[in-house]
Amino acid sequence: MLTRAIIAVATTLTALSPGVAGAQQVLPRSALTASGGYALFVDELLIPHAVVGVGAEWLATPRIAVGPELLYMVGPGSDRDLFVLGVVRVGIRPFSARVAPFVTAGGGLMRHSSRFGGRAFSATEGAYVAGGGVRIAVTPRVSLAPEVTTGWEAHLRASVSVGIRLR
């Protein structure tokens, strides 16, 4: 059993090493993203929020992209939410494909702020997201990615990201 684990780790490290990975395929290693969309938070009522975000991602393998994501959500009145997440997207097909469906998972922090009765209120708590979407190559360097996620603080988000590959 231990021998199988050592072989699996060695094989994975070898496959991810720059020399072997470069021989397999030239990957666009990084991208910057900007997104916009809409979220509904679940409380006694559904609370709508406009969503804008930025992020960066790096391809760890042809089907795994990882990176940070910053989302800012504007709700009614003074209701504001800031998500700082680490996100991993796993492609059903390689991300180099023209159309690449993917699943998303991420975790980090959410900072909520609002005003109640003239007093400012803010709180920070853990957050996670999970969902999926599809990345569509518009040009060799530009992609569009509609995505739907759910997460904690309890919400449902639909957004579209534009990605610009840096290399």
Image (tube, rainbow, N blue to C red):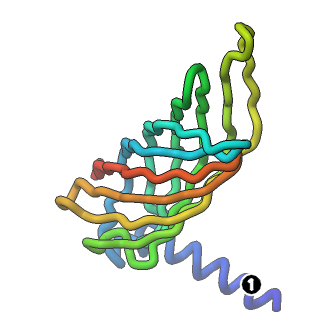
Residue 48 against residue 76 in the figure, above or below: below
Residue at left offset 25%, top offset 72%: 98
* In front of the other: 33 or 46: 46
Which residue is under mark 1? Answer: 5
Q: Which residue is drawn at 54% across and 40% down?
A: 48
Residue at position x 45%, y 43% from top? 55
Query: In the orientation shown, which residue stands out farthest toward the left?
Result: 139
User: Taking 18 as reference, is 79 above or below it?
Assistant: above
Say which element carries label 1: helix
**Quick check: 113 left or right of 58?**
right
Residue 113 pos. (x, y %): 67, 23
Decide if residue 111 is in sight here.
yes
Give, as a three-letter code, the residue at label 1.
Ala
Residue 123 found in image quarter? top right
Nearer to us in this view, 112 or 100: 112
x%, y% of residue 66?
52, 56
